[in-house]
Amino acid sequence: MGLQSIDYIVFFIYFFIVSGYGYWIYKKKNTGITDSKDFFLAEGSLTWWAIGASLIASNISAEQFIGMAGSGFAMGLAISTYEWMAAVTLMVVAIFFIPIYLKNKIYTMPQFLSHRYNDAVSTLMAIFWLLVYVFVNLTSILYLGALAIETVTGIDFYYCMYGLAIFAIFITLGGMKVIGYTDVIQVFVLVLGGLATTYLALELVATSTGGNGFLDGLSMLRKEAADHFSMILSEGELMIPNGQGGTRDAYMDLPGISVLIGGMWIVNLNYWGCNQYITQRALGATLPTARNGLLFAAFLKLLMPVIVVLPGIAAYVLFKNGSFQQEMANQAGHVIPDHAYPVLLNLLPTGLKGLSFAALTAAIVASLAGKANSISTIYTLDIYRKFFNKNASEKRLVGFGRIVVVVSFIIALVVAPALRNLDQAFQYIQEYTGFISPGVFAIFALGFFWKRTTSAAALAAAVLTIPLSTFLKFQFEEIPFLDRMGIVFLILVALMVIMTLLDPKSKNNPKGLEIDASMFKTSTPFAIGATLICGIVAALYIIFW
């Protein structure tokens, strides 16, 4: 148990490479001129491979390594739908969303809402995003990361939190250029260490079941955990631990076929297309560069379940065969799926454990840095500059943005320990970000493609998305949260359409966007790559239906 000297050596090699490279990028790219767009967006300086790597590094964090592996332990391959459907979603965003943003010179999501609707809609949604980014995303990433590092190293939970926060602040204060280029190293370490963990996990499964080698381990996974290899769950098909000694139906998290045709699309399109945290990487690039970056990210997304879900299923088989029952339980003796990945890391041999630990840390720090940068961008450009200091200099904006980074981490450090009672943090994150996702996506979708959509309709959707989601959650608890998101989305779209049609001024809406088909044309190589992505995802669903 715990890390050995060689593991710490491997980890510190990673630490110094990332830190040194980040500092080198900062000095090399530093023009000597303070510019807020350069700091927040790295305008024009990120290549397609840096954009794609940064998207994945920011997306894959403790919530995937720990949370999704925990869900893999509990409900199996079905949780991979978040990754594989995201690959298809990235193609939709690349083709339809990014051209609109770039044509209208959009730098933040609230800026788009102000441009398309008005400042009231923009400010309200900026506040919603800041609350979710700080109190759900940043906090949960910090909590899960500290939990994992505590489990692997034995270092106190609070010291782990402080260390992660300091490392992430160091990266974030360098601006988006430093984040984008260091994310390339982070993704390399993340993929290499993640694959090493998966390989060793499968070998452990093979050994525990009388086989030999990782291929035997993969075969035994299908045999020993047959109920964990279904992508489309039926009601009552799979009962999972609830962290309190009981069980609940996995269908409530992933409600069968409606995952493919319902709320999962809202989750993904909102996350990948209407989310400052993600789109920020592409907003400073040219259209071909941005599209190629998203295509690269989509191919990497196809690989993610191998890295984060298969180890969770392997941990389930090992647990079922009698390994680490005590380590998988909380103090009350109840099984906690989120312990699966950290416990599995402790079974790895010396050296490889250090590499996997570095991969986990890379994922956590990259995601924390990306999230903090987005918080800083929205608060500085859409709140501070608009309401508190309209004439702020570029130097003042960058300086204030750095202060916001530090303050957001202080808040997250205070709130994160409160999450310790969760059984599957990944589902917590999805459900509670889903309180605003239907409203956000309804506002963006109609704003993009229907010129008549009015500001009053958008404001109504923004105001009602949380109350309506809350009402359905507590009055109709039997409805899976993805289905609930779909219902809320349809209600809000209907409301927006009705309000717009009843407004006679909407026929000549000066805020409507000018859209033409030529904006959505793609290059032949991109079209081939996008078709290949969709074909692979379709094949995966057919195989594991």
Image (cartoon, rainbow, N blue to C red):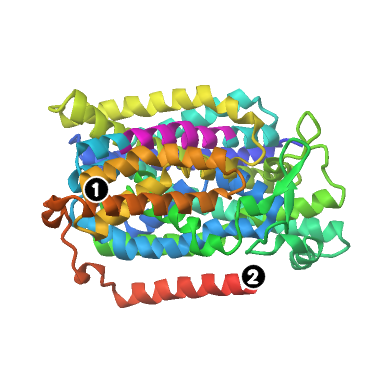
Q: Quadrant of residue 378?
A: top left
**Is 348 in front, or is 435?**
435
Three-letter code, disc 2:
Trp
**Can you say whether 486 is above or below 522 in the image?**
above
Residue 377 shown in magenta: no
Q: CA distance from mark 1 to mark 2?
A: 43 Å
Circles 1 and 2, Cβ within 8 Å, touching? The answer is no
- Residue marked by disc 2: 545
**Can you say whether 15 is above or below 303 in the image?**
above
Q: Secondary structure at mark 1?
A: loop
Residue at image coords 42%, 46%: 437
Q: Quadrant of the C terminus?
A: bottom right
Q: Quadrant of the N terminus?
A: top right
Q: Earlier in the sequence, mark 1 or mark 2?
A: 1
Q: Say whether residue 268 is visible.
A: yes
Write the start and end of the magenta stretch as one range.
Answer: 125-143
Is 147 on the left or on the right of 138, as rendered? right
Q: Secondary structure at mark 2?
A: loop
Residue 385 position, x and y percent, is 20, 29
User: What kind of secondary structure does the magenta stretch mostly adopt?
Assistant: helix
Residue 116 position, x and y percent, is 20, 48
**Is 281 in front, or is 103?**
103
**Is 387 in front, or is 307?**
387
- Residue marked by disc 1: 43
Residue 252: mark in rendering: none
Residue 249 position, x and y percent, is 70, 50
Is 236 on the left or on the right of 384, as rendered? right
Residue at image coords 42%, 75%: 531
